[in-house]
Image: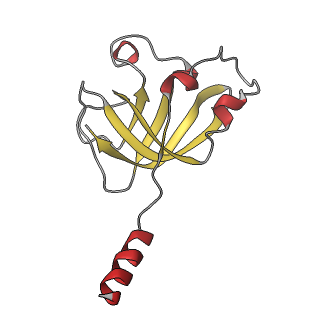
Amino acid sequence: MRRALLLLALAGCDRPAPAEALPFLELGAFEYEEKMTLPESVTRWNRREVEATGFINPTAQARDLTAFFLVKDRASCCFGRRPQMNHYIDVMLKPGRKIGYTTDPVTVRGVLRVEERWDGDWPLGLYWMEEAEVVAR
């Protein structure tokens, strides 16, 4: 009996801490300007494991996606203009993971990086999630 209780207690130790639900509206709740100091309401999410629910905006293809933009609503997905810099998360899935495009919402889990990245004079994005996984479709 003691051994069984000990095994049950140890089994619970391997569970990862639950990811925090990231409110998408909070990411875009400010007027973004290039090279600005980002608000604390956004920077507090930096390096935290989060779950964010939104829509896939494929960047290159519709099948076997390993990377995509996660956007807050369908209006900023696919057929409209590119979403504003603070209205999407650039998602890179864990190696070997793929997902096909869907019009349904998806929930993605990973560590969020809040960092304005540039390619020379061209802004690339503010929010990044690498080694992510899709946990709900």
**Relative to 81, does residue 70 appear above or below in the rendering?**
below
* Residue 44 shows in the view: yes
Going by the image, does 47 lie left or right of 90? right
Q: Quadrant of residue 45?
A: top right
Q: Quadrant of residue 99?
A: top left
User: x%, y% of residue 33?
Assistant: 70, 17
Question: For the point 46% across and 16% down, which residue is it?
Answer: 82
Decide which of 135, 124 is in the foreground and name it. 135
Q: Quadrant of the N terminus?
A: bottom left
Question: For the point 62% across and 26% down, which residue is it?
Answer: 123
**Relative to 122, does residue 134 appear above or below in the rendering?**
below
**Relative to 1, does residue 17 appear above or below in the rendering?**
above
* Residue 119 shows in the view: no
Decide which of 51, 81 is in the foreground and name it. 51
User: x%, y% of residue 55?
Assistant: 34, 27
User: x%, y% of residue 107?
Assistant: 35, 37
Decide which of 80, 120 is in the foreground and name it. 80
Q: Quadrant of the C terminus?
A: top left
How has the structure been colored for display?
secondary structure
Question: For the point 37% across and 56% down, which residue is it?
Answer: 95
